[in-house]
Amino acid sequence: MTDILKPRDHKDVETAVQAARAGARSLEIIGRGTKRTLGRPAQYDLTLDMSALAGVTLYEPQELVLTAMAGTPRADIEALVAANKQELAFEPMDYGALLGWPESRGTVGGMLAANLSGPRRIKAGAARDHFLGVTAVSGHAETFKSGGRVVKNVTGYDLCKLLAGSWGTLAAMTEVTIKVMPRAETEGTALIVGLDDAAAVKAMATAMGSPLDVSAAAHLPPVVTARASTALPARSAVTALRIEGVEPSVVHRMRSLRAMLKPYGVMAALGNKDSRALWRAVRDVEPFAARGPAGERHVWRISTAPTEGAALSRHIARHADAEIFLDWAGGLVWVALAPDALAGAALVRRAIVTSGGHAALVRAPAAARAAIAGVLSQDTALAELSLRVKESFDPAGILGPGRMWAGM
């Protein structure tokens, strides 16, 4: 059984990493463990539970800056900034429904380690784009700091960008600083009914290329809309486009957007409440929830160029029993495949070789996850660079070895 260490402060974390390095013992870093089943399953000698390092240490609403210990519950931070009519603009997804965990249990450190984002990524970027500063302990068992508490910080190397999306394999973050943004007063969503994937990608490209400041664009086939927890046309494919802001602006831009997209077919619209419910469902991939009709399927998250989303989806659907929907105007493809010993990895690999991009296996049994890489990519140069970065931060390979690639 893996020994669990629960540090109380930064010094405890440094001491734990020093001991692990000295004893050549592997170390798993977790917040509340809500994403432990992503990536390859691996056996670790020690688990570093960061959940006791919690609390907001600085929040300046006027400066749009917040600093917190890495184990702080994300829900606490979201509630705090919401009370000041602010939000995390990158709209981080909650993996709870998809992985079968209780929702709203993740930590701010886990959010950044996974580089989370949601539908608004096409406008606001991902977590790394709002990650301003960090205090952490590397695999050398050395403390380092990067960035600071200002939005424009150009001193030294921006190590925050490297740590975001590293899944705890480069360093143990203990304190982080993030940028927050004002929350939109209201929103609305324009719907186009009945498009296929290719036509939907064209319609979304038209909307994203307009001056109407569209903040989300997704295409949901009938099997997905049937499971949505909001008012969508029944048994129809739906292409959804979100507009946010103050009410007069939203009303005007929604009218213009619907007029622009009228040539693509039947139009409908969702008001503020239904719009928020729809995009939360898209954000958290609720149609593929572990406790829903797609709960037994293996789920892949594929990033590609928006113009390639339809072709990639078509390639997979032609060769497998797949449920698929598109986010990020076609740049994010969620794929739920019928159960398979290798989770359909060969098919997914062929699709990204053809269309470009990379894929992450999000949900599958441990045996399937152990047999393949946690991340598939056509870019071998990028994989080699990732290995060199890993060796720079953690030359002994004690932090999360094997989490994303065997032997790394």
Image (cartoon, grey):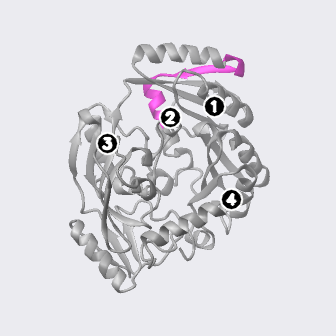
Q: CA distance from mark 1 to mark 3?
A: 30 Å
Q: CA distance from mark 1 to mark 2?
A: 21 Å
Spot occupied by residue 87 in the image (x, y as percentages of width and height): 35, 37
Spot occupied by residue 144 in the image (x, y as percentages of width and height): 31, 63
Q: Nearer the viewer, residue 265 or 13?
A: 13
* Residue type pointed to by label 4: Gln
The span picked out in magenta is 262-279
Mark in front: 4 vs 3:
4
In the rendered structure, the answer to whether residue 236 lies left or right of residue 182 reads right
Residue at the image position 43 percent from the left and 66 percent from the top: 170
In the rendered structure, the answer to whether residue 343 lies left or right of residue 69 reads right
Q: Secondary structure at mark 1?
A: strand
For the residues bearing labels 2 and 4, Cβ distance under 8 angstroms: no
**Which of the two labelled residues, at mark 2 and mark 4, occupies the earlier sequence position?**
2
Q: Secondary structure at mark 2?
A: helix
Q: Which mark is residue 153?
A: none
In this figure, which residue is indicated by the disc labeled 1?
Answer: 238
**Which of the two labelled residues, at mark 1 and mark 2, occupies the earlier sequence position?**
2
Q: CA distance from mark 4 to mark 3?
A: 36 Å
Residue at the image position 66 percent from the left and 37 percent from the top: 222
Residue at the image position 73 percent from the left and 54 percent from the top: 351
Mark in front: 1 vs 2:
2
Spot occupied by residue 216 in the image (x, y as percentages of width and height): 53, 33
**Residue extending furthest toward the front:** 155
In this figure, which residue is indicated by the disc labeled 2?
Answer: 123
**Which of the two labelled residues, at mark 4 and mark 3, occupies the earlier sequence position?**
3
**Quadrant of the rendered image containing residue 407:** bottom right
In this figure, which residue is indicated by the disc labeled 3?
Answer: 78
**Quadrant of the rendered image containing residue 16:** bottom left
* Residue type pointed to by label 1: Val
Q: Secondary structure at mark 4?
A: loop
